[in-house]
Image (tube, rainbow, N blue to C red):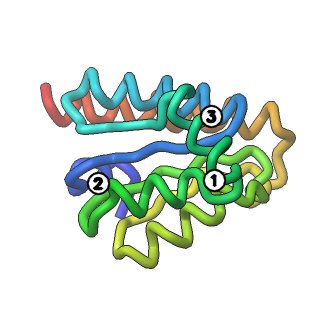
Amino acid sequence: MTLVEQIVAASRVYIIGNGGSLANANHICNDLLTCGIKAYTLDSATLSAWANDNGWEYVFAQWMAVVGEPGDLLIALSGSGKSLNILNAVTEAERMGMTVHKIFGNERGESMQDAEEMQLTIGHQVRACLQLKTS
């Protein structure tokens, strides 16, 4: 199933990332919302408060445990593909029966900058496909 098909089939879409990948998650989330997709990312205030109280390693996994359900989609962005909080969220989402789509730079050997650029390129391609589907 393609990413566009996964998004269309999902009840809700959650997008996560760290640093530049979190900025990309926010950007892609906004693009999906403009296409009528129920898309969410964790806001910076909640993210930092939750991490401060519980640690960074499980911040996204805990979020998935609270809000995620089977039929939802988690899009996980990581330039390195090694961030423990992203990997833990992927594990939790899969455990819960959610669909997971990873866009990880290390799987393709890119630099961090190339990986983050790829995330936005994929996000923009998805938005264009979704707009075509709804036109």
Bin the neighbour count of mark 1 within 10 Å (Cα to Cα): few under 14, some 14-19, many 20 and up.
few
Whole-angstrom CA distance, mark 3 to mark 2, is 32 Å
Left-right relation of 54 to 110: left
Front residue of 63/87: it is 63
First of labels 3, 2 by sequence position = 2
The quarter of the picture where the C terminus appears is: top left
Identify the residue shown where x is 78% and y is 59%.
Answer: 82
Identify the residue shown where x is 45% and y is 73%.
Answer: 94
**Secondary structure beneath label 1:** helix
Identify the residue shown where x is 30% and y is 49%.
Answer: 7
First of labels 3, 1 by sequence position = 3
Q: Nearer the viewer, mark 2 or mark 1?
A: 1
- Residue position for label 3: 48
**Residue type, label 3:** Ser
Identify the residue shown where x is 27% and y is 21%.
Answer: 34
Residue contact at pointers 3 and 1, CB within 8 angstroms? no
Front residue of 115/50: it is 50
Bin the neighbour count of mark 2 within 10 Å (Cα to Cα): few under 14, some 14-19, many 20 and up.
few
Of the numbered discs in the image, which one, if any, rests on residue 5? Answer: 2
**Residue type, label 1:** Asn
Question: Which residue in the rendered view is the most extreme toward the left?
Answer: 135
- Above or below, 111 against 9 in this view is above
- Residue position for label 1: 54
